[in-house]
Amino acid sequence: AFPPGGPTDTAARIVAQKLSERLGQTMIVENRPGASGSIGTAAFIKSPADGYNLSMFGMPALLAPLLFNNNAYDVRKDFMPVATVYDLPMAIVINPRVLPDVTNLQQLIAHAKASETPLNYTSSGTGSFGHLSMEQLKDLGGFEMQHIPYRGSAPAVTDLIGGQIPVMFADVVAALPHIQAGKLRAIAGSSNKAKLLLPGIKSVAEQGFAGFDADTWGGLVAPLGTPRPIIDRLNAELKVILADPELQKKLIGAGAVASYQDAETMRKRLAADY
């Protein structure tokens, strides 16, 4: 339910390849983005419950029903969790050409407070973790920035690199290669887990906001009515796949951290986060 190149899409493709090998089945990833994942999710829950339709669910699609009044699903009851797949650290990143003197969070806040017009920032979409986390940070820090939403992380990062927008609360998976290439600069991680991907970058909590944590996560889900033996088989395969050091390395390289939890634990996690 998200665009190509974003964190959910990347994790889905890495896992799909391994699942395909283990199950002897061709797996096709279809992207149907829009409205923070709610368009694709609403379409997905109507899919046949035959085990041949699965979705890599991302947290923006959990938030969307709380922010829009036209969503046609409830994450607590309208699909069947299979297993969690990844945790996704996030980071506040900037375009160093546009903000050359900003190297940490406090400098960004000082720049935003001194700006005569609101500094623009972007995220993967209205109601995304990046959007809401930055809004929370603005409240905590007493500064203003204007949100410019995009339809997914990849197009937002493209315009961030281009300089159209100088700041993003980004999924590390989308920003990491550009950080490594020097096109973007990470100035704060969403949590300590972000340090696995961005060594040397201090978290938001370490830069004056104790207790701040904005990691997101994702997992595989199936339509309601999918036979339990199929759910159990997929769950068992994911447990093996996510313990594979090679796959863990691929996910880390893409900005995500492999994280297996069984179907019941995922169901409880969805309900708790909701």
Image (cartoon, rainbow, N blue to C red):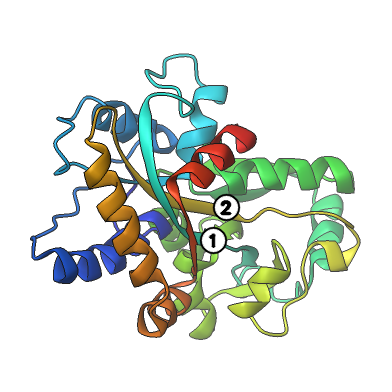
Amino acid type, mark 1: Leu
Q: Nearest the camera: 206 or 161?
A: 206
Residue 142 left/right relative to 8: right
Q: Are marks 1 and 2 in contact (CB under 8 Å)?
A: yes
Q: Residue 216 carries which label?
A: 2
For the residue labelled by badge 1, is the local secondary structure a helix, a strand or a loop? strand
Query: Residue at left 23%, top 34%?
Result: 226
Q: Position of residue 262 (x, y in %)?
A: 46, 52
Q: Where is residue 31 in the image (x, y as percent from the top left)?
A: 24, 47
Indicate whether 110 appears above or below 243.
above
Amino acid type, mark 2: Thr
Q: Nearest the camera: 96 or 223?
A: 223
Q: Where is residue 66 in the image (x, y as percent from the top left)?
A: 56, 23
Q: Where is residue 198 in the image (x, y as percent from the top left)?
A: 62, 79
Q: Nearest the camera: 120 or 66?
A: 66
Residue 232 left/right relative to 168: left
Query: Residue at left 88%, top 56%?
Result: 209
Compute the Cα span from label 1 to label 2.
5 Å
Q: Is residue 267 visible?
A: yes
Q: Quadrant of the C terminus?
A: top right
